Image: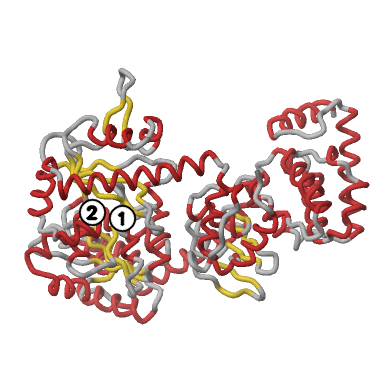
Amino acid sequence: MPLPEEFISELKQNNPVESVMSSYVSLKRSSRDYVCLCPFHSEKTPSCHVNVGKQFFHCFGCGAGGDVITFVMKAENLEYIEAVRFLAQRAGMSMPEEAKNNDLSRLKARILEINRMAARFFNQTLMNDKRGEKGRLYFNSRQLSPKTITKYGLGYAPDEWRYLTDHLKSQGCTEDELIAANLARRSDKGGIYDSFRDRVMFPIIDLRGNVIAFGGRIIDGEGPKYLNSSDTPVFKKSRNLFSLNFAKRSDERRLILCEGYMDVIAVNQAGFENAVATLGTALTPEQARIMSQYADEVIIAYDSDGAGQNATQRAINLLSEAGVKTRIIKMEDAKDPDEFIKKFGALRFKKLLDNSDGAINFRLSKCGNDLDLESDTGKVEYLKRCSEVLSQIASPVERSVYISRIAKEQGVSREALEQQINSIIRKRTNAQKKQSWNEIRTFSEKRKEDPAAVNFPKEYKAEKGIIAYLCNHPEELSFVEQSLPSDCFLTEFHKKVYEKLISGMKLSADFNILSLQSEFTADEMGKITAVLSEAQSLETNRAAAEDYIKILKERQENLQSAAAPAALSDDDFLSLAKKIRSRK
């Protein structure tokens, strides 16, 4: 059953789209509305617009769009009902009973409950069971206090094939639920067995306090060092960070990015709660954008080995794209933060953080790799690499300081080095202007890939014009409905939007097309907001509407004479267009 319209209306009133989005992105005022960098794709120029009056957002770069519910669906990777529940909790509202009748939502809720039961069972085994002694010895060797073990809910999975599954089945869990939660796997013979065995366990907890997954570290024997939950209905590796639930409490707008669970826990135990780590994978663009919501600066504390240094460079690039300033700690006589804190203590680690170097010095230090700086060729290549790095410094004063230093170190003219850098900046600025323009046009260009837009551009524009006209002039419902049967629409999508718009407006004078999230996908809502956004450039007066209607009715007559169906899929359009062209 659909949710009551009154409830959804109140939900949106209590969760203005600009208020919710401001928790994820930095909004900048633009006339009565806002613009921002799109949270759903990397960009340097804002192409995401927030319409305050009509309460929707639309990105002209990637086509994402919709109302506040659609935004939460995409930002939190939630289904419609879950996004509504998320916003209801945010506004202190109770969910209607109808919201409970959703199979996927029920499965997700069940997996979260099972994960919580598993985390408690692993922790109890570690703390109180004889079989947990191996885990207790390991955490003791890593100098973790009982308080820290309790804080993170750490546990132990014994070396038994069905230790967890037998327990959870005794608590009423089904085999299919355990497999869906990735806590069990099915054998070739049809039975199930535990996914995690003989490992110390790290529950992964989201920002709402739910146990969404697990990481397991092997203590000895064969197998991967870390085994992490695969993606499940409640967990996506690329969209979560370990210990962000604790780090978000920090008053600092600064995060410490570590390489693994134990580093984060050691740093946290030493008094630095703002530490996080990725979940068994390299940093992703999604994780970088999540970090940008909680920090203006990230200190990268990866391992000092080659792999850690390569990962540092990747993290610098991704965080820079997300608009986050980065610094890098340089650990001497220790391979990672955990070892450094054990050797030198928390005060030395704080000093290391406070004196951490900027990303520029880190990147400059890598410019001489594999080069013979004693040779002219090597020196020229080194200066080219340095110029590329320095050209990315936004502040002219800061850039000037580095230019003077490099020029002096290499014995070259400061003016020549500066001229080289300015040339790179000019080229990049021109390229960025072109890219920004392309990003704004991306959605329009994608639209041209639609066979309807290519082969029937007038009709395609007319369909969007009629939808925009109805949205802007609901008082014209009777005129439009009587003048234009839905069968006159050529595209299935626009026809569906038109029909839903007509039926909704008949039921309520205040009907809003954006209230149809439950009937359209998030991508389709993006198409709808594109129509609403482009309405500003479309004529939506009575005369224009009459022209749109005339265009569609004439095309309908032509299609009927060609024995074509009333509404066509994209593939059908291509086929029909070829037939029509072959007849000319």
Give the image location of residue 4, x and y in percent. 68, 53
Q: Residue at x 25, y 44 (%)?
A: 121
Q: Which color scheme does this rendered protein use?
A: secondary structure
Q: CA distance from mark 1 to mark 2?
A: 7 Å
Residue 500's place in the image compared with 556, above or below, is below
Give the image location of residue 34, x and y in percent. 60, 70
In this view of the protein, which residue sits in the foreground, 91 or 460?
Answer: 91
Outermost residue, top side? 189
Residue 332 horizontal side relative to residue 479, left or right: left
Q: Is residue 136 visible?
A: yes
Q: Residue at x 59, y 65 (%)?
A: 17
Q: Which mark is residue 261?
A: 2
Give the image location of residue 210, x and y in percent. 38, 53
Residue 492 horizontal side relative to residue 69, left or right: right
Residue 488's place in the image compared with 427, above or below, is above
Q: Quadrant of the N terminus?
A: top right
Q: Label 1 is placed on what type of residue?
A: Phe
Q: Quadrant of the C terminus?
A: top right
Outermost residue, bottom side? 397
Verify CB contact (< 8 Å) between mark 1 and mark 2: yes
Q: Residue at x 56, y 69 (%)?
A: 19
Lower sequence index among marks 1 and 2: 1
Mark 1: few/some/many CA within 10 Å (<14, 14-19, 20+) = many
Q: Mark 2: which secondary structure?
A: helix
In this view of the protein, which residue sits in the foreground, 58 or 16?
Answer: 16
Q: Mark 1: which secondary structure?
A: loop
Q: Label 2 is placed on what type of residue?
A: Tyr
Q: Is residue 438 visible?
A: no
- Which residue does the numbered mark 1 point to in the structure image? 242
